[in-house]
């Protein structure tokens, strides 16, 4: 089989010479400090914390419908109707942030809280006031605002018209973004247009396991991806031309990625892992940085579509004008990262595999049973994968500034714990590999955002996936936030700029 030249020109052998488990067997946490000016934050998202789903004029959105229609869609039958009630208790959350000493808070605006039916015709002033109160409280505490406009919660009114599958969503999102810039621009230190397009499109409009639960593998998920990228690009261009000169802040998109490690040292497995990375991360970053889908995707999805009897590629192409629109719409790379997978080349490839984005890559992906896991099954703890991913991003996309916009781990115990040593170990080891990538790999990571400040509603995991450094007691009606051990560890890292008791400059 022939592979496009992009694969042959990479020095992949050097980059992924060995399985990280061998390579980092005797790994020691680095005693080198964080670079000067490095910033630390925490993250949340509207649906996971706000609650007040129908309070003060908020309109419904797809996650409200998703869980109301079928409560069993979350592992404990709960939903985000109340969540951690941060709509009323946001000052408690900000007090936790102050205790930890973070530089910034990453949070999201719920589209349907400010625009109940999704369009800018009707603004819900009470929803606007809520966010202004949050901004003011953060500012009063000296915490910067890093704000996501879209964290998966398209208004129900727009989903009724097809949501991310309707080409009009590009303009709907642009209008919503413009309103955000106008209403909140003065308070926001850095914008994110859209969070994790991979989850929106493949989980939401491919497998259908996330809201809005549309099952359209291999077709809808690509239409969604195209619209998400165009919506991001238009919103970013508008801000770049009209609002950047006024507010002088930055704007970008958050793309999440796992690390994909080849199973063996063979050329075939190395190529398979690179193909998977292109299907996962390249699918979104390549258009934004280089202006088009990765070559390998165009080739693979095009070939398979023909074999499967489609008249045209299931991966809808961008016009020349659209490529220009999308290319360069970022100020820095914002990366969410949690776990790692192994990749193995397929010996014999099916001529007509099932129609889906996963199958289109034509490689086998799995996790090792020897890896430690947290409460959520896929959540394997593989710290070295983080360092490898960061070095690969630099190798693939050049010397771009990187913000870690999410990283963290769930409790091992579903009912939660205040003694979360495993989270301290996770944060310490992931950050250590990140620091090595900075110091030895020259990767330009400038800040780190821990997910999350408080235990919150973890989508289909419900409250069984607790990722906070503060426990929220769901058995107590006042939902108190209680510090876990990891909050003290993170506070100390922020204070000392060091992962261990002491650090050595070199
Ligand atoms: C880790 O530290 C131990 C004890 O100092 C040392 O023997 C070992 O070589 C170190 N491992 C690496 C990979 O540097
Ligand atoms: C392909 O095109 C033909 C003729 O335009 C049409 O009848 C057929 O339904 C199309 N098939 C698919 C899979 O789109
Ligand atoms: C949570 O609240 C319940 C009910 O008030 C209480 O019995 C329990 O001790 C609390 N748990 C913690 C860890 O504070």
Image: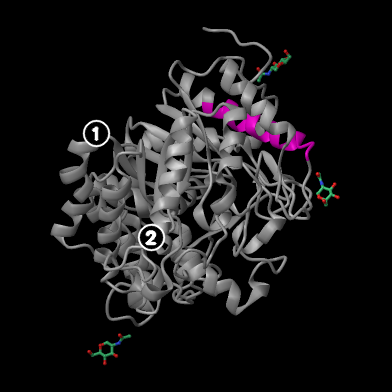
Q: Which image quadrant is residue 428 in?
A: top right
* Residue labelled 2 has its Cβ within 8 Å of some atom of ligand 3: no
Q: Which mark is residue 114?
A: 2
Ranked by sequence position, the earlier of labels 1 and 2 is 2
Mark 1 crowdedness (10 Å alpha carbons): few <14, some 14-19, many ≥20: few
Q: From the image, tell me which residue sits under label 1.
A: 248
Helix, strand or loop status at disc 1: loop
Tell me residue 146's x, y (percent).
41, 39
Q: Is residue 43 magenta?
A: no
Mark 2 crowdedness (10 Å alpha carbons): few <14, some 14-19, many ≥20: many
What segment is highlighted magenta in the picture?
Answer: 418-434
Compared to residue 174, the image places residue 261 above or below, namely above
Q: How far is mark 1 from mark 2, CA to CA?
A: 24 Å
For this rendering, which residue is in front, 292 or 478? 478
Compared to residue 121, the image places residue 251 above or below, namely above
Q: Which image quadrant is residue 90 in?
A: top right
Disc 1 vs disc 2: which is toward the camera? Answer: 2
Residue 361 visible to an observer of this rendering: no
Q: State the predominant SS element of the stretch in magenta.
A: helix
């Amino acid at each position: 089989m022939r592979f496009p030249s992009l694969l042959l020109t990479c020095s992949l052998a050097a980059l992924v010479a060995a399985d990280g488990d061998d390579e980092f067997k005797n790994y020691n946490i680095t005693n080198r400090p964080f670079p000067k000016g490095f910033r630390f934050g925490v993250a949340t998202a509207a649906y996971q914390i706000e609650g007040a789903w129908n309070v003060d004029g908020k309109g419904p959105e797809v996650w409200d419908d998703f869980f109301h229609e079928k409560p069993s869609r979350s592992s404990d039958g709960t939903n985000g109707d109340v969540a951690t009630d941060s709509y009323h208790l946001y000052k408690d959350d900000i007090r936790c942030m102050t205790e930890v000493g973070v530089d910034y808070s990453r949070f999201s605006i719920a589209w349907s809280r400010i625009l109940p039916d999704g369009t800018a015709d009707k603004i819900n002033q009470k929803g606007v006031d809520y966010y202004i109160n949050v901004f003011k409280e953060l500012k009063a505490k000296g915490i910067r605002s890093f704000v996501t406009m879209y964290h998966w919660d398209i208004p129900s009114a727009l989903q009724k018209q097809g949501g991310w599958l309707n080409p009009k969503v590009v303009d709907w999102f642009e209008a919503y973004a413009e309103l955000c810039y106008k209403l909140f621009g003065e308070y926001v230190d850095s914008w994110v247009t859209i969070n994790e397009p991979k989850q929106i499109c493949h989980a939401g409009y491919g497998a259908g396991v996330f809201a809005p639960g549309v099952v359209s593998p291999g077709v809808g998920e690509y239409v969604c991806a195209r619209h998400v990228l165009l919506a991001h690009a238009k919103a970013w261009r508008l801000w770049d031309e009209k609002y950047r000169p006024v507010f002088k802040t930055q704007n970008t998109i958050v793309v999440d990625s796992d690390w994909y490690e080849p199973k063996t040292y063979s050329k075939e497995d190395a190529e398979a892992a690179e193909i998977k990375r292109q299907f996962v991360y390249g699918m979104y970053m390549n258009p934004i940085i280089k202006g088009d889908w990765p070559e390998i995707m165009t080739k693979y999805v095009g070939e398979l579509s023909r074999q499967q009897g489609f008249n045209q590629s299931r991966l809808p192409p961008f016009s020349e004008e659209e490529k220009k629109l999308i290319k360069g719409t970022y100020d820095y790379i914002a990366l969410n990262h949690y776990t790692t997978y192994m990749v193995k080349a397929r010996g014999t490839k099916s001529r007509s595999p099932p129609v889906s984005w996963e199958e289109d890559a034509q490689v086998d992906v799995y996790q090792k049973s020897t890896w430690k896991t947290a409460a959520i099954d896929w959540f394997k703890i593989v710290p070295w994968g983080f360092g490898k991913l960061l070095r690969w991003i630099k190798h693939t996309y050049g010397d771009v500034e990187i913000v870690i916009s999410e990283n963290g781990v769930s409790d091992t115990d579903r009912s939660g714990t205040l003694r979360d040593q495993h989270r301290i170990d996770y944060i310490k080891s992931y950050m250590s590999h990140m620091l090595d990538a900075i110091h030895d790999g020259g990767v330009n990571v400038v800040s780190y955002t821990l997910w999350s400040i408080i235990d919150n509603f973890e989508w289909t995991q419900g409250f069984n996936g607790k990722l906070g450094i503060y426990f929220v007691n769901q058995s107590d009606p006042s939902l108190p936030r209680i510090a876990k051990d990891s909050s003290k560890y993170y506070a100390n890292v922020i204070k000392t700029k060091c992962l261990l008791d002491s650090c050595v400059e070199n």
